[in-house]
Amino acid sequence: MELTKPAEIFDRDVEWAELSRFATDVRQGATLGVVSGRRRQGKTLLLYELAKATGGFYFGATEATPVDSLRRLGAALGEYTGAAGPLHLADWSHAVDALLALGRDRPVTVVIDEFPYLARASRDLPSVIQHALTPGRPERVESRARLLLCGSALSFMGGLLAGSAPLRGRAGLELPVAPLDYRAAASFWGIEDPVLAAQVFAIVGGTPAYRREYVQDDSPDGPDDFDDWVVRAVLNPARPLFREARYLLAEDPDLRDPALYHSVLAAVAEGNATRGGIAGFIGRKATDIQHPLTVLEDAGLVVRDPDPLRSGRSRYRIAEPLITFYQAVMRPAWTALEQRRSADVWRRSQRRYASAVLGPGFEETVRQWALRFAAPETFGGIVAEASAAVITDPVSRTSQELDLVALGEPPFGDGPRPLLAIGEVKWGRTPGVAELERLVRARELLAGRPGLETAQTRLLLAGGKGFTDELRRLAEQRSDVVLVDPVRLYSGN
């Protein structure tokens, strides 16, 4: 049975459907689910409304000692069950059994939000839950509790069910709650103009919380209001969004050296996508930054994209647009911003915003369009992977960056993998015939690569400001050229 999604929850149809199926499962036996995602994505709202819709139990953990947490949980259970007073929970074994007991008569949703707070204070808690959910144990068999553990510490939550972790094999649901995609974000912000939507998304991304309390429900009132909106909502020290990028790092307990992690993020924001480039930017050896990169990756703040054309090579990018904006625009002018000279800082930052924030953000949006929204006939197949890559021209001895390399699904057997498209993306410049000729040359270089099928490779050109008339005429005459502008990104396939 699927519960009706509350009107307060925007989008999240897939997540709500999965949670509904889990919570309303009538089969006998307690079950476990794990919900994770970066902060501000709406996990708490989802789970609170789920508990409310099913008459379930919701408990939000806080940073506290085990004794204090057990006391708070006992008080919440006493209130939920209508007991004469708080329940006395001697330890976590008694507490987990008390939670399972809530499902003796019917399926009951039991939500423990911010679970990492409890588990870090009581290291044996995952093992306690593992024991409580042992197959055949009477407390589990006689219960239909649907226990949901939720947390924002991605590295911790990811480890709950991994490898030899105690809860591996115990969970029937593992649900990540990701930021809204760029189209859903535009709808959530109430922005219809695709250029404006791209500009806003490059700053705040798809984090739902940034639309409401973080900017007091302030959205740009059309393209002409964008600059004023940045000054009054993003660069305003009185708005919570102003310090949010700093808090994202400070809140993760695994990021123990903030200065180092800020430097690594600054290097990536400046366009240093390789491990060697990042190391050179911050004055460290490449081997010295592997650990901080791994920690940032585990925390969901950095993404490592393998280069599809060079085995063993990877490129790093920042996963949260607000952090890119902070590192590129805000951090270098932090003192001036705190002195409320935001309008002046924004005027001086236009080029940095365009090159370090909007340009890379637009490139990633094009890749997401190819993966999620482009029709199969656009590229002659379904795009399975889309990333950036670098190729070398042995004739000119120069390297060429490809903003898009779209690969089809791997073939059965040993056949070559279809290279569906290669592309170049420009926000500030209008692509023309010169860009198309570069892609033609790149396709020629890739034609001899073993393991790639390039006979049907399309040439994609994406422009934030449209295309030259000559390029448009050529595209009309050639079936292998795909042109993508903001209108197509936000409404076409």
Image (tube, helix red, strand yellow):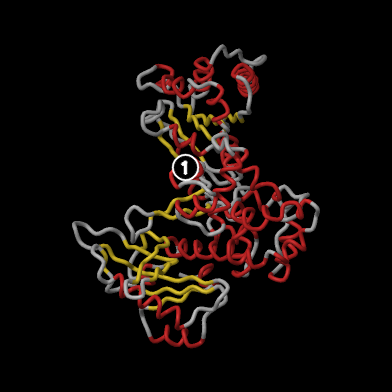
Q: Where is residue 41 drawn, in percent x and y?
A: 58, 46
Taking the image as drawn, is residue 1 in sight? no
Asked if residue 164 is positioned above or below residue 231 in the image, the reply reads above
Q: Is residue 453 left or right of residue 31?
A: left
Taking the image as drawn, is residue 379 in sight? yes
Asked if residue 274 is positioned above or below residue 77 in the image, the reply reads below
Q: Is residue 101 left or right of residue 259?
A: left
Asked if residue 92 is positioned above or below residue 361 in the image, the reply reads above
Badge 1 crowding class, 10 Å Cα cut-off, few under 14, some 14 to 19, many 20 or more, is few
Q: Where is residue 463 drawn, in percent x and y?
A: 52, 74
Q: Where is residue 412 drawn, in percent x and y?
A: 21, 57
In the depicted view, which residue is nearer to us: 358 or 56? 358
Q: Is residue 101 left or right of residue 215?
A: left
Q: Amino acid at mark 1?
A: Asp
Q: Which residue is mark 1?
A: 288
Q: Where is residue 97 drawn, in percent x and y?
A: 49, 18
In the depicted view, which residue is nearer to us: 378 or 446? 446
Quadrant where the image shows the C terminus: bottom left
* Label 1 SS: helix
Residue at 63% across, 62% down:
200
Residue at 70% across, 63% down:
220
Residue at 50% across, 65% down:
363
